[in-house]
Structures are given as C-alpha cells and as structure tokens.
Image (spheres, rainbow, N blue to C red):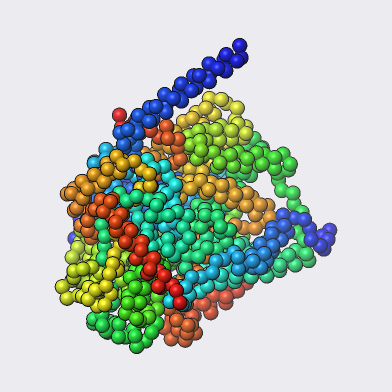
Amino acid sequence: MKKSGLQKTPEAFFTLFCVGLAGLSLAFIGSLVAAPKLLFGRSLTAIPPSMFPMIVLGLLLVLSLALLVLHFRNPPEIDDGPNGLEGWRRGAVFFGIMTLYALTMVPLGFLISSAITTALLSWMIGNRVIWQIAILSLVAPILLYLAATRLLAVSLPELNAIELFVARFFNG
Amino acid sequence: MFDYFLEGFGMALRLDTFGMMALGLFGGMLVGALPGFTTLMAMAILLPISFFLDPIVGIPFLLGIYKGGIFGGSIPAILVSMPGTGAAVATSRDGYALTKKGKSRKALDMALFSSVFGDTMSDIFTILMIFPIALLVMQFGPPELFAVLLLSLVIIAATSGSNPLKALIMMLLGLWLSFVGTDPLGGVERFTFGIFDLKSGIPLLPMLIGVFAIPEVASVVMKNERTKQLASVLGERLSFKEFKASFRTICRSTVIGTGIGIIPGLGQVVAAMMGYSAAKNASSHPETFGEGELEGVAAAEAANNAVNGPTMVPLLTLGIPGDNVTAILLGAFVAQGLRPGPQLFEEQGATVFAILVAMVFANLMFLVIGYLSIPIFSRLVTIKVSILIPLVIMFAFAGAFVFRSDSVDLLMLVGFGIFGIVAKAAKFDVMPMVMGFILGPPMEYAFGQTVAMTNGEAVNFFLTERLGAMLVLIAAPVIGYLLWRRMQTVTVGGH
Amino acid sequence: MLRSTIKKTAGLLTGAGLALGLSVGAAMAEYPEKPITMVIPLGAGGSHDLNARVITSIIPTYLNQAMIVRLTPGAGGQKGTQEVANAAADGYTLLFTHNYIDMLQQHVENLPYKPGEDFVPVARVNYAPIAVIVRGDSPYKTMDDLVAASKANPGGIQMAHSGNWGALFVPAAQMMKALDMQWNLVPYQGGGPAMQALLSGDADVTMGFPSTISAQVESGDLRVLATAGATRIYDDVPTFAEVGVPGDVGFMHRVVLAPAGTPQEVLDTLTAAFTALGEDKTFTRMMGRLGESIDIIDGPAYEAMRVEQDAAYKSLVESLTSQ
C-alpha cells in the first residue's frame, strides 16, 4: 500500500542533494566563478565563463525539483538492498583501507603502501592463507612497479632510498 | 594513384613489418589493459625507436600499439567493470554484466570481432575515399561540432532507459563537474574554491574507475557470501550464430563510427555511445541493454574502432593531427622524412599506401592475436576474490596516480567510489553523468568559438553560412523526443 | 631488561639509518645516479612533446642515465611548472617549457610561484620564429593588403589562434597594437586546428611556425605575409620589423629549467650534456627531420634573456589589458 508523501529513500536524498547543490551554486555564482579578463577593453572570451554553468545549474534545479514532485506523488517502494548492516560495516572498512592507501602512497612510497593495502584487503575479504597473502602483497607490487618504471617509463611514487637501490641494481 | 596503391601493397608484404606489428599489437593490448597507463604514453615512449626503423616497419609498429590498445582497454571494462577510457564505458555496462553471468569469454570475443570488423571496414573505406573525405572534413567547423555534440547528449539522455528525467539530472551533474577548474576559453577559475589542485579540473580516469569499478568491487566485498570467484564459469566462446545475430548492429555501428570519425573533434567516446544508443533504439528488446546484452558490446566496440580510419585523413592530407595519437604519428612520419600534407601522395605515394595497407593487415592479424589471448585474460576472473580484488585495487590506484602524477587523484578515486555507491543505491545511472562530463568541455569550447566567429550576429551567421549546424540544432530536441517515445512504447511498462 | 632492549634497538636503527643516509649522500656526489625526470607542462603529442622525445632518446649517452618525460598538463602549464618549483633541487626533476609560459604567464595570472626566483635555466634548446599566413587564394597578397583591409573593417577579419596568451595570440596582439588595427580573435585548441580553420575558410589569417607550414607553403596552399626575426626567412617575405612591428615579437624559445637552489656542479653537468647534445649528429638529423632548429645556449646566457622578457612582457600585458 503506497502512501503519498516523501519517503526517506536514498533516491529522495540524492535528488534533494541535487536541488541543494544547484540552488546554492546559482545563488553564489558570482563568488564561485571568476570574472572574465579583458583585452583592449573587450572581454577576452566570447561567452562569459558563468554562462554555461548558469544554464546547467538552472536546468538541474528545475529538473530535480520536478523529480522531487514526482516522488511525492508516486513514492517508490522502500528497498533496503541486499546488504544489511553487516554489509555496510564491511563497506566502511573497505573504504577506510582505500583511504589509507590514498593517503600513504606518496609518503610511504608505492611498494610499502601497496603491500600493506593488499594484505589488509585480502585478509578482510576472507583470505586466511598466509603464504598467498605474503606473495600477493610482496611480489605483485614489485612486479607492477618494475613494469611501470622500467618498461613503461612512468613514475610511481617511491622513497628515495628504494629508487636509488633499483637504479643501482639495474645499472650495476 | 592506383599504381602507388599497388606498389604500396607489395611493399607492405614484409616479414619485419608483420613481425613488428604483431609485437605492437600484443604490447599495445597489454598496456591498454592497464587503466591509466595509456597507449598514448606507450606510443610516445616508443616513438624514438621508430625513428631508427624503416618507415614501413616503424609506423605500422606504432599503429599496432594504438589498435591493440583500444581493444586492450575493453578487457578490464568487461572483466571487472573498470573502463580505462571513455570509449570503453559503453562496453563495460553489458560486458561486466555478461561476466557476472559467466559469459566473459563471449563478451571478449564479441568485443574483438566487432572491433576488428569496424576497424577494417573503416580503414578500407578511408583508403578508397581519402580525398573525398578530406574535402568533407573541411566542411565541419565549431558550429557543426557544437550542434552534433548537443545532439549526442540529447540522444544519450533519451535512450538511457526507464527514466530520462533521472538521466538528464545525472548528465547535468556531469556537465557541472566538467566546469570545475578553469574554463576552456578564457582560463578563469570556476568552482575551485581557491584550491590549487582543482584548478586543472577533475581528472577523468579516477572518476571512471571510481564510479564504475569501485561500486562493483565494493558490492562484492559487502556481500560476504563467501563467493570465491567473480565468475566460476568461464563460459564458451562466441558461437557463429550469436555473431550473426549482431551482425546488423555491427554494420550499423561501423557506419556510425566512420561518420563520426570524419567530423573532427568528436572521437571514440561519442562513437561508442552513439553506436550503443542506436542499437538499443533499433532493438526489439531495449530493456536487456545494460543487463548483459551481447549486441550492446558489439555496437559500442564496432563504433569506437571505426573512428580510426577517417581520423588519419586530416593527418595525411593536411599534416594536421586531429588528436594526441595522430600527433605522435605525425612526429613519426616527419622523422622519417615523410611530409604529411598536400604533396605527400605525390612524393611518397607508395610508402603511404604501404603503411595504410599494413594498417588493414594489422587488424586481421589482431584477430588471431586477440583470439589466442582472450582465454588467458578471461581466466583472470576465476582467481579467487580475496586475491583478485586487492590486485584490482592496486592496479586501479596505480593507474589513477600515473594519469597525472598527482596523489590528490587517489583521494578523488575514493571519493568518486563513494559517490558511485550512493548513486547506485539511489538508482541513478552514472553513465549519463560520465558522458556529460566528457562532452561538456568540447561543447562549451565549440560554442564559445562559434560565438566568437559570429562577432555578434548569431542568427544571420547560422542561416547564411552554417545551415547544416542550424538544422541539427533544431532537429535535436525533435529527435530526442521521438527516441524517447519509441523507448516508451517498446519497453514493457514505463517508469 | 626491556629498557636495554629498547636502547639497543634504537641504536641499531640509528646506525642503519646513518649508514643508509651516508650511502645516499655519498651517491649524490656523482650526479646523475638515477634516472632524471623531465616534466612537460603541456599535453601529449604537441611539438614540445616531440622535441622532448628526441632529446630524451639521445641525451642518455651523455649523462649515463635515462631521462624520462613526464607529461603534466593542466591549468595552462601551471601544474607542471608548480610541481618542479616545489621539487627537490637535486637535479633529478627538470622542466621543459617555453618562454610564454615561463615569463609571460605571471603577468596575466596569479601564479603560486615566481618564475624568476624559483627557477634557474639549464639550457635553451632552440627557438622558432612565427610567420603570418593566409590562404593561397586569399585576396591579401602582401602584409600591407591585410593591414589595410583590417583597418577598413575593424573586427571583421577572423584570426585563428592557439589559445589565450599563447604563441600565436601574443604576436597577434602585439601586431594589432603596433599597427593600430583590430582582428577578431577566435580560439582553437592549438596551432594545428588553427591552421585547419584557415584552410577550411573559417578564419582569414593565422600564424604558424615554419616547421609546420613548409609543406603547405611549397604547394601553394598557404601564403606567408611576414616572418619574425631579424633576417628574412623567405626571400620575398618581409620581416616583422619591416612591416612596422619591431622588437622581440613572435619567438618561442624552448628552454630547460631546474628548481632554484640546484647545486652548481649538477647544473654544470647538465649544461655540458646539452651542449654536447647540440653537436650530436643523430640529434641534428632528427631535429632537422622534425623541422626544428638547434640553437643551444647555456643557462646564464638565457637568464639574461629571461630578465629582458620579463620586463618586456610586463609592459606588453599592461598596455594590452588596460583600457
């Protein structure tokens, strides 16, 4: 039995978020978008930099309000999703590990941060075979690092000492 | 001209050409399979090597890397829902759904066959019609580009499925995200809140991985059903019957892709999405698209490869590269003493045709190389999840970092991952958002150029000089509405 | 018992750290010890990228270490530039840029660094003079024709350029000021698309470097009306000075910079390598094929030019944007 009214679904929150985003941005567009520069007294660009944003934000505001109205009239079923509380907890841990990875990659270098992250993730997902975790976290990052820096000549962040060691190792 | 062609044909049939092409194709495929480690970079690094090789060996080698790379990008898109380029986004939808159903090999096969078909046909077309294409290319300027981009966005929103309103909202969100940074015309800051790292805008690759791959990976993690593998069944190879069923779509996508390749500035992303949308629209069961429909993979892949042929035309006939890849090819050509431009065919006709013919052969060779490699790749999804997912995350982060050598991108990756999960829970499709994000800047730029060109007299300008653009602009909402109506009537139910 | 263990461990660690640090320090004495990164603040595939690929493929023979290109486009060149400004001044991170980004940008943008203070030049690789070009079938046969038409129709002549304050924009603005005329400046994504716009008829005039336009000039598709520099590049085409635009107009210098504070020995090694590069036969041949010249001048010599550019661009920007 569907009731009329705004259900507290993720959908509704998301739409509300869009409304808020669009509305606030439009209201403060002057301070969010810098003024165009001048050349010979005329504007340097043919269209002001705030033009497209204003159009887009305006449409966003209108459409998300429309969606909210539609929701109000025909609320969708509340669906908890297949996850449950345990699932969300695991998700939180998962994202925690990834954030840790993002923050440690530069200070600790690629090899160390990847070793830590892969080991943690593997354990978290359920792997209990120690030698597998060891090989995964120690060998895989090294292989990727070597392939990236030696073959593809791209740079991954790494501690100075390790970089020198690798350079010495290859150049003799 | 025909004599040059024959001579070139003969010149191309060399063992070292084929050998280096095979090497390039295989290597390109591997590099392309690593999101973030772009084939563009691989080509740029190997460019100096090509300087020291014979032009008929060196340039096909670079071309091989490029073509292998395009398919390579589809591999992680299909296997772990991790598209490395905007062009692979359309493939990742159906491709990954197929993997979950245990049909990963079929999906990869279909991607391979459609890519090769689209590329080969488009290359042959280009060789036959180089000069007419060159004239056609000249007809397109900023107003036309803007019109076509707008039309593409309308089509994407109209064919996106059950709820175009939601799709439009996501597309607008994507457009707004594309505005963060400096505006493409004047270089003033927008929505950066004074943060320097935002000044160059939001990077694409972390967004792609974050929004497509992370939610899928997270849902596997969150389920905790002790699912040991992503897909326990490898699945059979593609059957001829299945290929035949999608053949019409492949042809249609090839035509679309070739057409889009002729218009400078559009590229593989638009081609893939247009091919996909067209196939969805023409199908009698559009609701299966996105749930694991082989035809969807075929449509996107054929189109995004068919773009390559005509892209070479401005490079060869004018010496003007249309994108970064052709710019590297330009360097390769010039370093070999070949001067792309009006006299290229007169001075070096045979050599140029040899290279073009080699390009066609590269596609055919890739059929074999790809076919043999696919079993190895598809086996990856049978690795147990507790090993596969950490590896996937490591590659994702490495790729996100390498993209711009910026550690802030890693945080963006995580941020977009969270966003992707929220969007999924809220039942909003992220694909229109990504499309809006990718197509926003070129659209704004083209519009700005157009207004600059008109010097104030917009309507007059459009009517007298750019009638084509005008017509497309008027047609866009009409086409959008018609497509949407068709989706409504064919799909069972509506919202 | 625990205390002594802790003390021993601490001592061990300190010793190890010292040893590592010493070895690292000792290593620094023989620069270069590991590959050098050359940051390019521009996108892939441009002429800058191509130049860099040639350089980095040959210079390792003179440095005994690889030199790796790292493309860091963004914010009009600021991203890569800032990265090098903030990098350690040990000679392992260099910047390969050009004078418009280096010296001009600071006068039109708020930069988070000071180019004059935060960087020291290693070597200028080459410079390229720009040329004013129109279509082969255009009604403007000489520069005077073009100027006259521009004055008669202010803002009616479409000039395609490669981006605000870029290598085509700045000479165009300088010309417009010196000759007192107005073009309608339409932006494009680089020199290539600008030239394409000219050829397709969307633009009436643009500019280009000899390396990119030579093929079309020879075939007659393009006509050159004026070139930068003190001497004529084409015999029958006047120089900028001859048509009334004097001064340092229309030159793009490609230069390698290092973070300020880089030790002198490191700079000397680098400069020596680049000078040797300029004499290298393979290098000369390849750059010739790319259509680029080679004109290596060392750091101190270019630094003098930088100072001049700084002052010149400052007054240029002031005069162009005031009103």
- Quarter-of-image position of residue C211: bottom left
Picture quarter with the N terminus of chain C: top right
Residue at left 49%, top 22%? C13
Residue at left 75%, top 55%? A9
Measured along the vertical axis of the image, is residue A124 above or below residue B448?
above
Can residue A20 be seen? yes
B102 vs C153, nearest the viewer? C153
**Image position of B459 (left or right of B53):** right
C6 vs B258, nearest the viewer? C6
Picture quarter with the C terminus of chain C: bottom left
**Image position of C162 (left or right of B222):** left
C171 vs B297, nearest the viewer? C171
- Residue B65: percent from left, percent from top: 35, 50
Residue at left 24%, top 73%? C241
- Residue C237: percent from left, percent from top: 20, 75
Number of numbered discs? 0
Measured along the vertical axis of the image, is residue B434 above or below residue C9?
below
Can residue B383 be seen? no
Measured along the vertical axis of the image, is residue A3 above or below residue C185?
above
